[in-house]
Image (tube, rainbow, N blue to C red):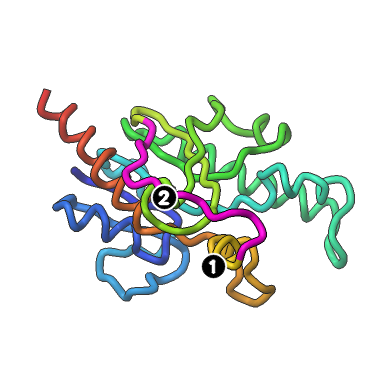
Amino acid sequence: MRVLVGCETSGVVRRAFDALGHDVWSCDLLPADDGSNRHIVGDVRDLLGDGWDLLAVMHPPCTRLCNSGVRWLKVPPPGRTLEDMWAELDTGAALFSDCWNAPIERVAVENPVMHRYAKERIRNYQQPAQTVQPWWFGDPAFKATSFYLRGLPKLAATHRLTPPSSGTEEHKRWSRVHRAPPRADRWKVRSVTYPGIAAAMASQWGGHAMQEAAE
């Protein structure tokens, strides 16, 4: 299958599909962290019409789209203006909308649950199909990840772990994404894709596509 992984620099999802023999490329405005020659630096929208079988958009800019940030559309953070906030909302919604409506049969877009202003800007908007956790797939971590799916099944858990009790040291370790301290690359830490989820995407979504093609 020809697979495009958009908005990813880590290569985690790209490598998972590659391990199963798919013709997979990642794309982002930034270079790949692993220096892969199967990474394209640029706007993913420029590639959407190139005959892909599956599109997985992993970390599109979502700060202005998600419920947790809706307050900034009424009272902007220090040093910013309302015009800035609404312009960034329009930009983020346009990217999501273009990917969601791409001329590709199978599409998955990772994004938090959106507020109503974002939903209004998405063509053919649908609610996320599911929200998963890394610990469903064998990775000891908390990080709710919502997937908007078109032409793809929901991911099935592969190796459920038992979450630790709240307040314990282990619970704190599992919460390291949310507890990441402020720093320049905090966005990268918080947007990490865990290998268990990536492996499930490659085996389940890649396998589903292959089965459909065979039929």
Q: Give the CA separation, mark 1 to mark 2.
A: 22 Å
Q: In the rendered view, does 87 fall on the left or right side of 130?
A: right
- Can you name the residue that lies furthest to the left here? 214
How many residues crowd around disc 2 within 10 Å: few (fewer than 14), some, or many (20 or more)? Answer: some
> Residue, x 54% and y 55% (percent of image)?
164
Q: Which residue is mark 2?
A: 161
Which of pointers 1 and 2 lies earlier in the amino acid sequence?
2
Q: Residue at x 54, y 67 (%)?
A: 189
Q: Amino acid at mark 2?
A: Leu
Kind of residue at disc 1: Val
**Location of residue 104 in the rendering, given as x and y in whole percent from the top left corner:** 33, 34
Magenta residues (range): 154-168
Task: Report crowding for label 1: few under 14, some 14 to 19, many 20 or more residues within 10 A (C-alpha).
Answer: some
When the figure is inspected, residue 166 is found, relative to residue 102, above or below; the finding is: below
Image coordinates of residue 206 in percent, x first then y, are 23, 41
Q: Is residue 167 above or below residue 182?
A: above
Residue 198 at x, y = what percent?
Answer: 34, 52
Compare residues 62 and 81 and report the one nearer the observer. Answer: 62
Which mark identifies residue 189? 1
Q: Quadrant of residue 151?
A: top left
Q: Quadrant of residue 212?
A: top left
Q: Is residue 82 left or right of residue 102?
A: right
Task: Depth check: give the residue in front, 12 or 179.
Answer: 179
Front one among 212 and 196:
196
Name the residue at 46% across, 42% down.
109
Which of the numbered marks, if any, corresponds to residue 157?
A: none
Q: Quadrant of the N terminus?
A: top left
Q: Secondary structure at mark 1?
A: helix
| Eye-nearest disc, 1 or 2 | 2
Residue ID at (16%, 35%): 210
